[in-house]
Amino acid sequence: MIELIDVAVAGHMERHLLLQKAIERGRRGPEPENVADPKICRLGKWLYGSEIDEATRRSEAFTVVNRLHNNFHDCAGRIMDLARDFKPEQATALLHGEYKTHSDKLVRALLLWKQELLMAERKKRVA
């Protein structure tokens, strides 16, 4: 699970570049509904997949990450809508404002979750 969190952090940081390129290109880019769907990216496939047990799904860390991940994708979808509507100034403002806030919160939550998992692993080894 820890490795997947590292991959998710890297992937979501790359999303910023994808959105920036989409804003520059206008209509050429991923479909807004695909960008807005939190189940399509690697983190979403993991969060919504069968690898995570029920106890983990009920944890506060999972709940927070899932909520922040959904907010992140909702905002990314709105950026794509603006880019496709040839509104680059609005899309860029959203990218550097609300989107950055969602992205930063998500990355912090993922790193905190990773830290919690590492501590739990250490406790198991000591016990």
Image (cartoon, rainbow, N blue to C red):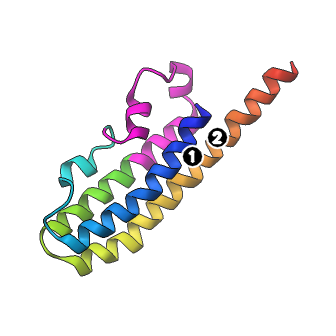
| Label 1 Cα crowd, 10 Å radius (few <14 / some 14-19 / many 20+) | many
Q: Quadrant of the C terminus?
A: top right
Please say if the residues under marks 2 and 1 sit with CB atoms less than 8 Å apart.
yes
Q: Quadrant of the N terminus?
A: top right
Amino acid type of disc 2?
Lys
- Left or right of 49 on screen, residue 104: right
Q: In the rendered view, tell whether residue 86 sits above or below residue 64.
A: below
Q: Which residue is mark 1?
A: 110
Percent across and percent down for residue 45 are 38, 33
Report the predominant secondary structure element of the magenta stretch: helix
Question: Which residue: 31% across, 64% down?
Answer: 19
Question: Which residue: 31% across, 76% down?
Answer: 92
Q: In the rendered view, tell whether residue 29 sits above or below residue 10.
A: below
Name the disc covering residue 114, or none.
2
Which residue is more in the foreground, 92 or 13? 13
Q: In the rendered view, tell whether residue 86 sits above or below residue 59.
A: below
Which residue is more in the foreground, 25 or 32? 25
Residue found farthest to the bottom: 89
Percent across and percent down for residue 77 are 25, 56
Query: What SS does tag 2 mark?
Result: helix
Name the disc covering residue 15, or none.
none
Amino acid type of disc 1?
Leu
Q: Which image quadrant for residue 124?
A: top right
Q: Which contiguous range is marked in magenta? A: 40-69
| Label 2 Cα crowd, 10 Å radius (few <14 / some 14-19 / many 20+) | some
Question: Which residue: 54% across, 53% down?
Answer: 107
Decide whether residue 23 is among the magenta residues.
Answer: no
Q: Which image quadrant for residue 32?
A: bottom left
Query: What SS does tag 1 mark?
Result: helix
Decide whether residue 50 is among the magenta residues.
Answer: yes
